[in-house]
Amino acid sequence: AGFLLVMGAFVFPRGPFIRPHPVAWRIVFGLAVIYELCLILLLYQNKRDARRFLAILDPTLNVELEEKEYATNCEVTWINVLGQ
């Protein structure tokens, strides 16, 4: 990733922004390219591998969700609103 940022600072095209410095904006563009490549990589993973990949960023993704029953009690009461 660092190599791509350094090369991007030299190779990426100059953008419309001139402040603080065009090289800074090229590095920001390089970060956007790395982010998009990660999203493309995630797109082609199966569900289990994608969860493992995202668990690096948020460890709560490895926790199994509790089973809930939906649309069983659709009354709008104060107790049902607080139970959500």
Image: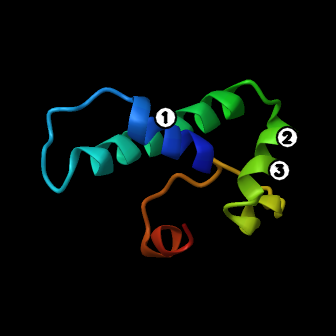
| Residue 3 visible in rendering | yes
- For label 2, the residue is 49
Q: Is residue 83 above or below residue 18?
A: below
Residue 73, image x, y percentages: 59, 55
Determine crowd level at label 1: few under 14, some 14-19, many 20+ residues with C-alpha closer than 10 A: some
Against 37, residue 48 (above or below) is: below
- Residue 33, which numbered label? 1
Q: Is residue 48 left or right of residue 6?
A: right
Tag on residue 52?
Answer: 3
Which one is nearer the viewer's eye here, 43 or 19? 19
**Of callouts 1 and 3, which one flags the residue occurring earlier in the amino acid sequence?**
1
- Closer mark to the observer between disc 1 and disc 3: 1
Give me the C-alpha separation between circle 3 and circle 2: 5 Å
- Asked if labels 3 and 1 touch by Cβ distance under 8 angstroms, the answer is no
* Mark 2 or 1, nearer chain start: 1
Q: Position of residue 18 (x, y in %)?
A: 13, 44
